[in-house]
Amino acid sequence: MNIIVLIKQVPDTTDVKLDPKTGNLIREGIESIINPDDRHAIEAAVSLKAASGGKVTAISMGPPQTIDAISEAMGMGVDNAVLLTDMAFAGADTWATSFTLGKAIEKIGKYDLVICGRQAIDGDTAQIGPQVADYLDIPQVSYVCEIEEVKENSIVVRRRLEDGFERIECDMPAMLTVIGELNTPRYAHMAGLIDACNDKVHIKAWNSADLGVQANEVGLEGSLTHVIKTFAPKFQRQGEILEGDTKNAVSGLIGRLRENRLI
Amino acid sequence: MTVWIEVDLCNGCKRCIKACPYGAIELKDGKACILERCTSCGACLDVCKEKAIQTDAEPRTIPDFSDRKGVWVFAEQRDGTLSRVALELLGKAQDLAGTLNQKVSALLLGDQISNLSETLIGYGADNVYLAEHPGLKDYRTNAYTSVIEELVNQYRPNILLMGATHVGRDLAPRVSRRVGVGLTADCTELTIDPEEGILLQTRPAFGGNIMATIANRYSRPQMSTVRPGVMEVLEKPGNKGDVIKHEVELKEEDIGTKILEIVREEKKGVDITEAKVIIAGGRGVGDAGGFRALEELATLLGGEVAGTRIVVEEGLVPVENQVGQTGKSVRPELYIACGISGAIQHRAGMMNSRYIIAINKDSRAPIFQVADWGIVGDLNNMVPEMIEQLKDVVKGKE
């Protein structure tokens, strides 16, 4: 079974802090990581390969330093990788990104499954998987929390719902977007990492010319949505601190709850 | 494309620094300077009054969309029950349609669900586009996408909103790609730009650390998903609406997915997005004993216990009761934050609560900035004292 995994390198947003004066993000010293959901996608792909043979190819779009994420994926057992890197790809929204990834998948050609994380922690949109699936005209299952069975031409998976799950049989080739519940990702083996560093043959870098796309179809110019403003979230309220010992502070609070008919 | 600064024109006003979503502009010697991490996103271009920021990108022409009319809401239903977020979106749609002087429509897909049309009209729909077919009984990506594609192409709406549920977040991106439009996920605020008349979509980014306002100038309908619990339901009693039936033809082989089984897992307690009172605990609550005290408080106030990501990860609170950026957004009447420092990711999920109370040992905890009332003190004393005093209040009422 040939599997393509889509991965993204993201800033570790759990580390992100705001500059208290300017309200801007402090980016210095923030580590770049493989997007957490995407690790589960890599794990799923590598385990499926172990069970049924075939090759796993990782694709990632990003600046040249995305090679770090790709090397780590190769350390986890990915066979081949494609880095989509070009200044023309920068500033892409999900429309332009799904187009670019779709083009790369078409160029790779034969595949049975495309697997990606449900969403990336820097954008949280969860749009890329379904949009790529629609571009490729293949069925999709998102929020996959268990892979039950791989059949000849279909795959049986569980899709997580808010209040339970669905068991779905999906024709292949198919797109799966996966969540953390699916598996426990393996660590990258040092040997695999070193191989990835030495063995450039299996890592390809493609730019817009390699994909045969025009500059106005990708990146910012190919995007349909645009950020027009950013600002620090405003949460401020009055914030009356109730003073006194435990008994008085609490009775002050209960009094305010009564005044506002909350109790 | 690249972006650069004409240094002679720059007056050092710093507007571009504020506008940059990537922190890629700095002031050097009183002039803006673009750093390596610039993604050429172009967010700085329009804010520069001096026209000192230049780009080699060709200006794009905005197509004429004056024929696109109507604010549409995808009325998600499961097992014949409307999702609450559909009604919340109709509330927002009434507001947007009022500003635009356009109509509100609901898209209702399913099997034998026409009885839900009345409810949708009662909550603000002027039209209900009704598509009924046995193949639409349970949500399936391709079947729903194809029907919505037909409706969009036939009736050409201006705006299309969907709930950011596990269904909406599967369907909306698929529809957006199919009908060739941009999509903004998980919006917390939707307004109409008074000059351009376009939809301004505001959403948290970078784990809730910044808010971004996004425009969708180049395609229609302007599509957004909105998380449940963010918008307000707005009943419209006596509203009259039309039900427009849409003929559905589905070929099973085009759909590609079969639902073998739907398993509903038993839920403990009420869905926190619908709770009137939430007692939320963070790391400061300590252990299971601390949460038992919160449970007792919740029972007295008729509320539910929720928690931050950390206590959920520690198994003290079930994951469906997690509040915050990676959990749920809630807007109860009363939110009591116990032992929660108030990381921005948590605040993002509870800032719409009507009243917020914070109890924390650390007077500098950011949670106090978002609270209406706060008590600086030890939870182990405060919570039992609240329970005692509330018991007296309850007794007094009897």
Image (cartoon, coloured by chain):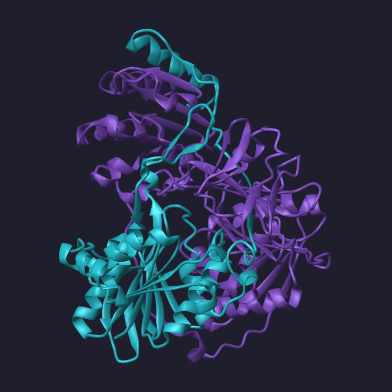
Q: Nearer the viewer, residue B285 or B325?
A: B325
For image coordinates 22% across by 85% down, the residue present is A53
Q: Colour of chain B?
A: purple
B29 sits left or right of B141 in the view: right
- Judge whether A63 appears above or below A211 on screen: above
Q: Nearer the viewer, residue B32 or A157?
A: B32
Residue farthest along the top direction in this orientation:
A244
In the image, which lettered chain appears cyan? A
Residue B355: x %, y % from top left: 51, 29
Total label count?
Answer: 0
| Residue B139 appears in the figure | no
Question: Is B366 in front, or is B303?
Answer: B366
**How far across and how far down the image is residue B364, in percent?**
40, 20
The spot of residue B328 in percent (x, y) is: 44, 48
Q: In which quadrant will I find the C terminus of chain B?
A: top left
Give the residue drawn at x 31%, y 18%: B385
The residue lying at 42 percent from left, 49 percent from top is B271
